Amino acid sequence: MIKQSTKVTIINDPIYGFITIPNGVIFNLIQHPYFQRLRRITQMGLSYLVYPGAHHTRFHHAIGCLHIMQKALITLKNKGVLISKEEEEATLIAILLHDIGHGPFSHAMEESIIENVHHEQISIAFMEALNEEFNGSLTLALQIFQGTYTRKFLNQLVSGQLDMDRTDYLKRDSFYTGMAEGNINTDRIIAMLNVFEDQLVVEEKGVYTVEKFLVARRLMYWQVYLHKTGVVAEQLITRVLKRAKEVSHTGVDLPASSALSYFLKNKIDQHNFKEALNTFSKLDDYDIISAMKEWCYTDDFVLRELSKSIINRDLLKVKIRKKPFSEEKQQKHINSLIARYNISSYEASYFVFTGKISNQGYNYTQGGINIVLPNGKIVDVVKASDQLSLKSLTKEVVKNYICYPKPKD
């Protein structure tokens, strides 16, 4: 049985100032080792290789989301929206734990040493385990997190086009990267929220604030989240982990923490992930960084050079354009690498590869952002806005990239 704390804790956050942590279940969840792990996982992966200030963590972000969700619920209740104490606590728990399933360096593990297990599935697995430990206290929070609760606006506050997750990470990431273009007015967004026919809506006078939010999100994706150096860094760390797993399966005992070794040596997928959940909870960025520092001296050429590339920030060259890169161009770089290092075509493919990045500033097909007009009519923000460029944000923009080693002097 979990002892309920009566302690009131205040956290001084650089974005919002003092944040009060509710006592009881929420305080105890924050104290849990599963959640404390988020202190050791960066919010933006390897983006600090581009923006040196971007060392903030998933813990920072989760606490920030908790804070603005508290403010959003107070705003809605002050406007006459009936929200029970149980619903309020469950919504706060859902947003607090929404990223608890992230592994080291965000999505790198999902595409390398864990097969076809998305971080949201891992978050659900963590919440289910905590629900058992906390005597069913997270049952309603799980419904809200999964979007199955009957009151849709609570689901939308946790996951939607204008949810508290996006509202925090845009402002927080903008602050830590120094990208002023991404700064948004969270207080104004929250103040304009309301509920109409069980749907989350924004009052008409908040339409310009929403416009700024959408434009800021688009700019942050192109300038920060999809920055070409950040893209190649994430691709490299994914390939490091993939290669480490291949090398481990040949019988080589690579230096690594016990938790990381477990995932390198075993096949983990949707069928057996829950059995590995406790081991996953011991993994963080430090495991990967420490391992790569050792792998810089391993005998395997691919693993050694990829690890050195990240540790020393000697990254691959990357080019981005709208038109796809030809196979001939890719093969030319592969052949050059084969000739230079006497490696196989497969090994060279770790250093020469193509891919796509895409950005859609606003996807109205996934719920959209509804504006309530003075006459009670509900319209999508694109129709309510007089900004012509807002419609263009609904179109997905796709760009192609190619990565290859820089030419040696």
Image (cartoon, grey):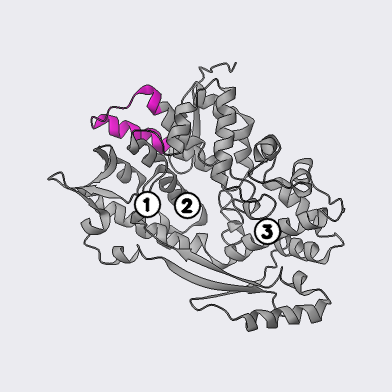
Q: Secondary structure at mark 3?
A: helix
Asked if residue 16 lies left or right of residue 153, the reply is right
Mark pair 1, 2: CA separation = 28 Å
Q: Which residue is under mark 2?
A: 175
Residue at left offset 61%, top offset 40%: 39
Residue 319's image quarter?
Answer: bottom right
Mark positioned earlier in the residue sequence (3 or 2):
2
Of badges 3 and 1, nearer the viewer stands 1
Residue type (three-letter) at the residue carrying disc 3: Ile
Badge 2 crowding class, 10 Å Cα cut-off, few under 14, some 14 to 19, many 20 or more, is: some
In the rendered structure, does residue 22 fall within the stretch colored magenta? no
Check contact, mark 3 vs mark 1: CB within 8 A.
no
The part of the chain drawn in magenta is: 66-88
Badge 1 crowding class, 10 Å Cα cut-off, few under 14, some 14 to 19, many 20 or more, is: few
**Residue closest to the far front:** 271
Q: Which residue is under mark 3?
A: 237
In the rendered structure, does residue 74 fall within the stretch colored magenta? yes
Residue 150 in view: yes
Q: Is residue 179 above or below residue 88?
A: below
Q: Is residue 357 above or below residue 13?
A: below
Q: Position of residue 402 (x, y in %)?
A: 60, 74
- The quarter of the image holding the C terminus is bottom right
Q: Which residue is under mark 1?
A: 366
Residue type (three-letter) at the residue carrying disc 2: Phe
Residue 338's image quarter?
Answer: bottom right
Mark positioned earlier in the residue sequence (3 or 1):
3
Q: Position of residue 144 (x, y in %)?
A: 42, 35
Mark positioned earlier in the residue sequence (1 or 2):
2
Q: Secondary structure at mark 2?
A: helix
